[in-house]
Image (cartoon, rainbow, N blue to C red):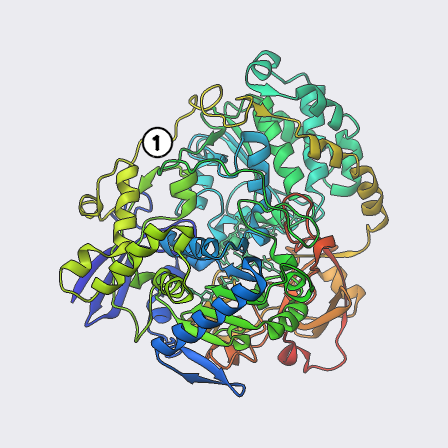
């Protein structure tokens, strides 16, 4: 038996784990009590990771679709055929006909995700789709405008704050985003224990709000009005340090002018937050010595995520809470910053700017289906399940069917892979050497600033290969150079040649060399040195007082409080306000994450889908259910965008009236490669989520997945939920 210290790469918390193995089999996974950041915390998903690694559904060889069925083929054949096809498509249609989707799990592994970007660049291709436009691209776009770059981000100093206003997050379940903290809920509960206060702005009375703090219900997708009202009140009370603002910020007067039309009383009509409650929150925020207002995915997925981010950070900034102990801190990256990118690319569909070098996933179907120069003909999907996770599943299915080449790289054959021409078996994270997530290393969003390195814990399953290696090999075969660099491709080819030579192979492993260069660039020494810190290595903490006037990356060196395009867009809010008033009685659908679900991929583990957990549901308040003659267990039909899904009803008075929720990630019935998930019920909510260029947030490219207006009725029969599928 062997014990390995590593860290979990399922969510941003990146908890330290102790994995016990025997003969390359995982026997046990326990939380690492000594880990410098997670100190013995890990959730059930991390502790059950062995079930993913050793799943009987793991792909062990490359698969090729022949006459509609998948057949096992050799790596040699797979790479040769894909490489040749790529070369032909590239020659005939140019680089922009090749695109990729990089899913969420691999985003936690730096090298494979960078290699995929290098692979695209080898062909002069730029269309990289990611879940970023389903969860956080508004923050990247906001970082660019306010602070000078997409990776310039701030996060609440939760260990010192006296007041936290948490908008659209539910840490008990999700562990949060844009703040990498194991067990964030303990830290949030501690705010109250030290005499501070926490408000949760959320249409649902969440598990987190039940544990600590005060819940304030908000009508979905009206947060932009909440922020406007809040800011209006701060300015009305003259609670702005004008001298501080003049020294470190630009655009205050324009900001003040923009919010002047939105007093708390007015916005209350659409947010449904009473004016007195807003006044009390502003009073508490201003009284606290260190206060932070923070929003997350529940807001990002609405129509105004970028606007909310802007106004929220303007609140933190003008009240002196930016760069202050207990306020919000600007993360310091671990690795040196990449040079600033030039002007952003603009998408051929919808003229949307790329954000953080990625293109909105809600226009993926259009990019594939719309003829013309740059039409996508070859697509690589690494570690993603876009058919279930991106909006407009039916159009995506049609689009995937039309591709000339569709290659999926995954550990299992998921729903999206059913549409592939080839499926390539890859490593599970525990089979790969790694450093922590990009938000740690490039943005430094950590209350406990630390760094870890892990070797692989078990050997690759069957013939599974590292994704980075696959892309490097494909470049070699297609006759192009990784990242357009002949030197890099040459190094890659040499490293491949020597891979099986004892000792020398290990020394020349490009993956390890790359990770070593990175750790050295961060002045942490090479990998040998990093191995001396199996419990993680503490780094200089993020400190208040080192950002304003020192590290702000905008051309002016100041925080920009009034980005021109956002000021302009704010003028359209009068119309939105009127529409909100008119749609007051409409039902709005929001997302909901679940303890045992992680997007789509945990449903293939038996322990996570036992009994009532084997389906998603429509969560609905009893008054809304009564109006529609629905009871617990009935099958409801949820309709939007000209389509519908059928799901069982769960009466849930934690939902705000007028709000319903259907968790995403379900609808696995036709996934023949997933022996457990295919037995579950439930429906894919993204069938009814809107896609296309007119549905995304301008400038951030965010998909609209929260606050979508739906109709709910009783379904005709009870068979709907079993058959709902893309
Ligand atoms: N168990 C589990 N954990 C996860 C995941 C998972 O699938 N399962 N997914 C991971 C991923 S990929 C991500 S990106 C993070 C996300 O993590 P966070 O960014 O912290 O977001 P969530 O915890 O999902 O919370 C979103 C909250 O927003 C609320 N909400 C919905 N609509 C609105 C609205 O219009 N306004 C406001 N104010 N609130 C709204 C919802 O009720 C919900 O409570 O979680 C990660 N953690
Ligand atoms: N309606 C609605 N839709 C949503 C959301 C929502 O709240 N509502 N949330 C959105 C969010 S926040 C996110 S992040 C996305 C997630 O969207 P995706 O990333 O598309 O979906 P996942 O389920 O995370 O995909 C995981 C796939 O990666 C595979 N995998 C796991 N580990 C590895 C690995 O190491 N290597 C490789 N190659 N494959 C691996 C799994 O087997 C699985 O097939 O969904 C988004 N979609
Ligand atoms: S909280 Fe996140 S990182 Fe920690 S064990 Fe759970 S899934 Fe893994
Ligand atoms: Mo996400």
Quarter of the image holding residue 47?
bottom left
Q: Is residue 707 left or right of residue 76?
A: right
Q: Which residue is mark 1?
A: 541
Which part of the image, by quadrant, shows the N terminus? bottom left
Q: Residue 75, relative to residue 536: is it above or below?
A: below
In this rendered view, identify the residue nearer to me: 279 or 576.
Answer: 576
- Where is residue 128 drawn, in percent x and y? 53, 55
Give the farthest residue toward the top: 243
Q: Residue 66, relative to residue 59: is it above or below?
A: below
Which part of the image, by quadrant, shows the C terminus? bottom right
| SS category of the residue bearing label 1 | loop
- Where is residue 246 drawn, in percent x and y? 60, 14
- Where is residue 666 drawn, in percent x and y? 57, 70
Give the farthest residue toward the front: 91
Badge 1 density bin: few <14, some 14–19, many ≥20, Cα 10 Å: some
Q: Is residue 518 left or right of residue 528?
A: right
Q: Residue 138, relative to residue 80: is it above or below?
A: above
Q: Residue at x 22, y 67 (%)?
A: 21
Quarter of the image holding residue 606?
bottom left
In this rendered view, identify the residue nearer to me: 474 or 307.
Answer: 474
- Where is residue 429 drawn, in percent x and y? 34, 61
In this rendered view, identify the residue nearer to me: 410 or 556.
Answer: 556
Q: Residue at x 61, y 47 (%)?
A: 300
Give the farthest residue toward the bottom: 67
């Amino acid at each position: 038996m062997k014990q390995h210290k590593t860290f979990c790469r399922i969510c941003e918390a990146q908890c330290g784990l102790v994995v016990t193995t025997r003969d390359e089999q995982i026997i046990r996974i326990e939380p690492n009590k000594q880990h410098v950041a997670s100190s013995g915390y890990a959730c059930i998903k991390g502790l059950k990771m062995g079930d993913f690694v050793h799943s009987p559904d793991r792909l062990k060889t490359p698969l090729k679709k022949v006459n509609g069925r998948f057949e096992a083929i050799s790596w040699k054949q797979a790479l040769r055929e894909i490489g040749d096809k790529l070369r032909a498509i590239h020659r005939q249609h140019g680089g922009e006909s090749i695109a990729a989707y990089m899913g969420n799990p691999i985003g936690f592994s730096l090298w494979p995700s960078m290699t995929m970007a290098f692979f695209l660049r080898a062909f002069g291709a730029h269309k990289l789709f990611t879940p970023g436009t389903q969860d956080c691209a508004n923050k990247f776009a906001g970082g660019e405008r306010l602070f000078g770059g997409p990776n310039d981000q701030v996060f609440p100093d939760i260990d010192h704050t006296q007041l936290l206003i948490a908008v659209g997050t539910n840490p008990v379940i999700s562990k949060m985003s844009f703040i990498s903290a194991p067990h964030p809920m303990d830290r949030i509960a501690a705010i109250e224990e030290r005499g501070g206060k926490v408000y949760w702005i959320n249409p649902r009375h969440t598990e987190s709000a039940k544990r600590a703090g005060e819940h304030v219900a908000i009508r979905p997708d009206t947060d932009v009005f909440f922020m406007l009202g809040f800011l209006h009140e701060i300015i009305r009370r003259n609670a702005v340090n004008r001298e501080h603002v003049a020294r470190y910020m630009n655009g205050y007067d324009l900001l003040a002018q923009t919010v002047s039309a939105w007093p708390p009383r007015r916005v209350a009509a659409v947010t449904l937050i009473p004016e007195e409650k807003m006044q009390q929150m502003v009073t508490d925020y201003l009284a606290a010595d260190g206060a932070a207002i923070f929003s997350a995915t529940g807001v990002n997925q609405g129509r105004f995520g970028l606007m909310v981010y802007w106004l929220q950070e303007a609140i933190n900034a003008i009240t002196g809470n930016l760069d202050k102990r207990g306020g919000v801190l600007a993360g310091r990256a671990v690795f040196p910053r990449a040079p600033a990118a030039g002007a952003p690319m603009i998408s051929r569909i919808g003229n949307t700017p790329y954000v953080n070098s990625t293109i909105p996933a809600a226009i993926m179907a259009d990019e594939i289906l719309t003829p013309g120069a740059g039409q996508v003909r070859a697509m690589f999907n690494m570690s993603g399940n876009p058919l279930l996770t991106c909006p407009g599943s039916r159009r995506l299915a049609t689009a995937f069917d039309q591709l000339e080449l569709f290659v999926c790289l995954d550990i299992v054959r998921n729903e999206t892979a059913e549409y592939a021409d080839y499926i390539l078996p890859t490593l599970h994270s525990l089979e790969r050497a790694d450093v922590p997530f990009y938000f740690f290393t490039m943005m430094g969003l950590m209350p406990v600033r630390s760094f870890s390195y892990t070797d692989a814990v078990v050997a690759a399953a069957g013939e599974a290969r590292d994704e980075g290696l696959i892309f490097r090999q494909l470049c070699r075969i297609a006759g192009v150079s990784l990242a357009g660099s002949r030197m890099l491709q040459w190094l890659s080819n040499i490293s491949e040649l020597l891979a099986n030579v004892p000792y020398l192979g290990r020394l020349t492993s490009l993956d390890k060399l790359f990770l070593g260069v990175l750790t050295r660039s961060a002045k942490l020494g090479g990998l040998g040195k990093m191995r001396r810190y199996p419990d993680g290595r503490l780094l200089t903490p993020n400190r208040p007082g080192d950002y304003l006037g020192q590290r702000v990356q905008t051309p002016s060196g100041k925080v920009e409080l009034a980005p021109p395009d956002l000021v302009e867009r704010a003028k359209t809010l009068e119309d939105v306000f009127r529409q909100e008033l008119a749609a007051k009685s409409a039902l709005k659908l929001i997302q909901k994450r679940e303890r045992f679900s992680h997007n789509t991929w945990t449903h293939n583990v038996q322990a996570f889908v036992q009994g009532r957990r084997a389906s998603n549901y429509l969560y609905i308040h009893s008054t809304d259910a009564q109006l529609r003659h629905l009871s617990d267990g009935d099958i409801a039909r949820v309709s939007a965008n000209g389509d519908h899904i059928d799901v069982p009803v769960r009466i849930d008075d934690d939902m705000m009236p007028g709000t319903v929720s259907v968790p995403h990630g379900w609808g696995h019935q036709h996934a023949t490669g997933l022996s457990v998930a295919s037995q579950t019920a439930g429906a894919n909510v993204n069938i009814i989520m809107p896609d296309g260029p007119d549905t995304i947030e301008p400038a951030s490219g965010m998909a609209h997945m929260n606050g979508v207006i739906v109709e709910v009725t009783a379904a005709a029969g009870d068979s709907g939920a079993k058959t709902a599928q893309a």
